[in-house]
Amino acid sequence: MCGIAGIINFNDMPVAEQALQRMGSFLLQRGPDADGYWVKDHVGFTHRRLSIIDLSEKAAQPMHDVSNRVTITYNGEIYNYQEIHRELTALGFKFQTRSDTEVILNAYIQWGVEKLMEKLDGMFAFVLYDNLANVAYACRDRFGKKPLYYLNNSSRFCFSSDIRSIQAVERNLTIDYESLDYYLTELSVPQPKTIWNEIKQVRPAHFIQIDINKASITESCYWKLDFTKKSNLSLEETKQFLEEKLKESILKRLVGDVPIACFLSGGTDSGLITAILASNSSRQINTFSVGVNNEEMNELPFAKNLAKRYNTNHKEIIIEPDILHLSPELIEKFGEPFADSSCIPSYYICREMRREYKVALSGDGGDELFGGYYDYRWAFLTDHYLQQYPNKIFRTLLRPVNYIRSKTDTKCPNWGLLEHYNNLSGGLKLYREMGFHPNEKLTLYSKSFKENRKEFTLNYLNQQWNEANGRSLTDTLFEASLKTRLLNDYLVKSDRSSMMNSLEVRSPFLDYKLAEFAAAIPNHYKFKDGIQKYLLKELALKYIDRGFLSRKKMGFGIPLQNWLKNELKEYSREIIFSGSLKRRHLFDMSYIQKIVNEHQSGKHEHTHRIWALICLELWFNKFHAQ
C-alpha cells in the first residue's frame, strides 16, 4: 500500500519537481519505506512506498516497462497478480521484478486499459502514462477502497491519494456547500464530490482517460454489481458455496512478503475471518481487539473467547481516547470534514497493530452485502408484506385489525409501520438518522445562508436510490448503501485511520466475486426466520458458537454521548461557541444552542449532530476555509 500523486500539464509546460515534492510530503504515512519522483516534460509522478510485495529496490516506483513506453504510480494490492504474471510470461513477456506493479504495466501493453481493468482483482488506485499515445489513465478499484482525488482544468490534471496534496499546489479552492450539506446529515462527504468545488474523486469501478493532446478527460465504468439475477441454489447449497467463496477470498488476501494480522471485534464478520483463517493455517495467527471502559460497548470478552478457541496470538487494547489532542490531528489527516466517531478507536487499534505488522484483515462489507443493519430488515419485511398483500385498499381496511394483533403477537409486524416505510422516498430510506435530518437544516441554517440554496442531500440520496437496479426495496437498499454509507463513510474511515499509521487493511467481504455471489442470493435466505445476516450467523455456528445467532449487534465506537455531557462538555461549548462558527454566518446559533442544551441536560440525544459541528469547526480552523 502506498501513496501516489502527480501533475499532467496540457500546455506543454514542464512539471516542476518542487511541486511534486510538495505533493509527496502529504503521503509520508501512506508510504514510509521509500519515495520516488519521475518527470518527463509535461508529465510528473511521485510515489511513497509501503513495501509489501517484492521488498527490493527494483520494485520501486514510479515504474516503467522495459521499453519505457508506459510509466505508472500505483497504490494497492492485486491479489491475482501471480496468475496474470503466468499468463503474460506464456505470451513472451520478461519481468524484472516480482511485483504486482510490473504486472499491471505489461498487462496494459498486452490488452489495453479496458481488458486490464476487467482482469485486476484487488484494491487499487493508479495512474499510468502511455508515452506513445500521449494519454494517461486514472483508475480506481471496484468498491472505492483506495482514494483517488483529482483536479481538472484547462491547463492541467492533478491527482493524489490525499486531497491535501492537491491543495498544496492549487491555492484557489472554494468550498462546495452541497458537500457540506451532505456532511451535516451523513457525517461524511458525498463522492465523487469533495469539500472543494474544484476537486473530485474518480468513481469506484471507473477509469478516467486523460487525452493530453486534446486537454480533455472521459470517464468509463468497467464493472457493476447486479442484484437483479437471483440464484436458484437451495439454502444448503448457498451455505456451502458461501463458505467456499469466503475461504477463497480470505486466503487470496494473504499474498505478500510480510506477516499479516486480523482485526477481531467479537462480531460475526471479523470472527468468521479469524476462525476460517486459523482453520486453514499451519501457523499461529495474530489478532487484535480494542475496547473502552464501557460495558455496553465492550466486545473484548467475545473476542477473547474466540482467540482462545483458535489459539491466536492475541492482543487486547483498552483505550481512553485523548480526544482533545487527537481530534484536530484526525481532521487534518482526513483532509475533509468527517464526523464518524468510530474512526477514533479505529485509529488506536491500527496504531497498535502497526508496531508489529504492515497488513491486517478486517470485516468491512459483511453488513452491507448480507443484511446486518436494522433498515435492511425493514426493507425485507416491507417487501414480504407488499408481496403478500398487493392490494392497497385491502391493506387499508384490515390495518386496524392488524394493529391490535401486532400488540399481542410479537411475530406479527405492524402494517402501519411497513406502509410508512414503503411511502418514504428512496433518499429517506437511505438516511441513517445520525446527523441533521435533511428537512431540519431549514432550521439549522441561517436565513442569509439558506436563501437561494436548493436541497442537495435528499436529492443526492434519491439519485443513488433511483440509479440502483434492484427489483425490490431490499436489493435497492443493498446496492444504494454500497454507494453511500459504505463508500463515503466506512471505507474512508478504514483507509484514513489505517494509512495514518502506515497499515494496509484488506477486506475479504469486499472481494468482487464474493460480492457478485452475495448479490445473487435470494433475500429470504439472508433474513431467514427474521434473523438479520442469517447466512453469516449460520456459518458462525460451525466456526464460533450459537450465541452469534442471538447476540445484539454492538457496533464499533466510543461512549461519545456521555462524554459530550460530562468530560467533553466544556470542550464542545468552547469549540462551537468560540465565535468563529457565528462569524461564518452559516448557522442559526440559537438553534445550535438549543440542541447543545438539550443534549447536555439529558432532554434529547444529539450526539452526532454536536460532534459533526465540532469536527466541522476544527476543519475550518485547520484549513483556514472561509
Image (spheres, helix red, strand yellow):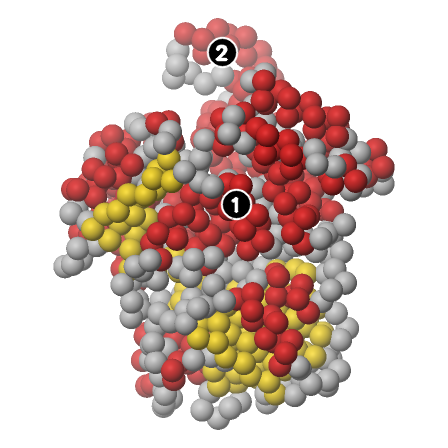
Between 192 and 257, the one nearer to me in the picture: 257
In which quadrant of the rendered view does residue 20 lie? bottom right
In terms of sequence position, does the residue under pointer 1 or pointer 2 come before the other? 1
In which quadrant of the rendered view does residue 457 lie? top right
- Mark 1 neighbour density, 10 Å: few (under 14) some (14–19) many (20 or more): few
Q: Where is residue 514? Give x, y as percent.
A: 37, 54
Do the residues bearing badges 1 and 2 touch, measured as CB atoms within 8 Å? no
- Using the image, determine if residue 106 lies above or below residue 382: below
Q: Would you name the residue on which mark 2 appears?
A: 402
Give the alpha-carbon distance from disc 1 to disc 2, as whole Å.
54 Å
In this orientation, does residue 537 appear?
no
Between 326 and 207, the one nearer to me in the picture: 326
Q: Would you name the residue on which mark 1 appears?
A: 325
- Using the image, determine if residue 147 lies above or below residue 239: below
541 left or right of 579 in image? left
In which quadrant of the rendered view does residue 605 lie? top right
